[in-house]
Amino acid sequence: MKYEIDIAGMKRELKLFKVADNLQIAAFILYGDVEITKHAARELLARAPEFDIIMTAASKSIPLVYEMTNQAGKEEYVVALKGKKVYMGTPLEMAVHSITTQAEQTIYIGEDDVAKLKGRKVLIVDDVISTGESLKAIEGLAEKAGANIVGRMAVLAEGDAYDRTDISVLGKLPLFDAEGNVL
């Protein structure tokens, strides 16, 4: 089953995937789609508050954040990773449980990224906001690093997340029942 979505004037067909007995989600995947990545970056930047640096979590939103950083004329961005790396020094960490991941994970930012965030205006960006758990974890890391969060953005908001007033998005991504009907 598929669902056609309009993302700020650009259409895509998204496959549906079961996440519970009577719940399916439409998978929005930026990987490999340069056209929608550039388009979404441009549209999000047109709505973005003034910022110094963008922060996201690995991994699907990395191409988007790269493109937004490039189009904004910035030199760096921060990605919270799903594993500790030797180059991180003593990293900051935050637990997260996302709807698209089966188990709780921990995300990390290293000492160099903490320095990039400290005292700066940070724009948090994700590909899709669902339950808000990934967003909450990214915010927690940014706050621990001493950042000033100036905005939260995503290409799409899934289900009730679309009604949140603290997030700017390009479109609504509905949830679906087992037969593919919009809930």
Image (cartoon, helix red, strand yellow):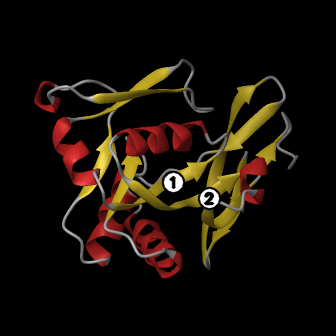
Residue behind mark 2? 156
Q: As rendered, which of 2 and 78 lies closer to the eye?
A: 78
Is 182 left or right of 68, judged from the image as shown? right
Amino acid type, label 2: Leu
Q: Looking at the image, which residue is at 48% across and 45% down? A: 139
Residue 134, how many percent across, how many down? 53, 39
Dot 1: few (<14), some (14–19), or many (≥20) neighbours within 10 Å? many
Is 153 left or right of 45, judged from the image as shown? right
Residue behind mark 1? 127
Residue 86, how many percent across, how many down? 13, 24
Question: Is residue 108 something one can see in this rendering?
Answer: yes
User: Element under label 1?
Assistant: strand
182 versus 83 height, above or below: below
Q: As rendered, which of 174 and 151 lies closer to the eye?
A: 151
Residue 121, how many percent across, how many down? 37, 63
Q: Looking at the image, which residue is at 66% across and 55% down? A: 157
User: Element under label 2?
Assistant: strand
Question: Is residue 28 something one can see in this rendering?
Answer: no
Amino acid type, label 1: Asp
**Is label 1 in contact with label 2 (beta carbons under 8 Å)?**
yes
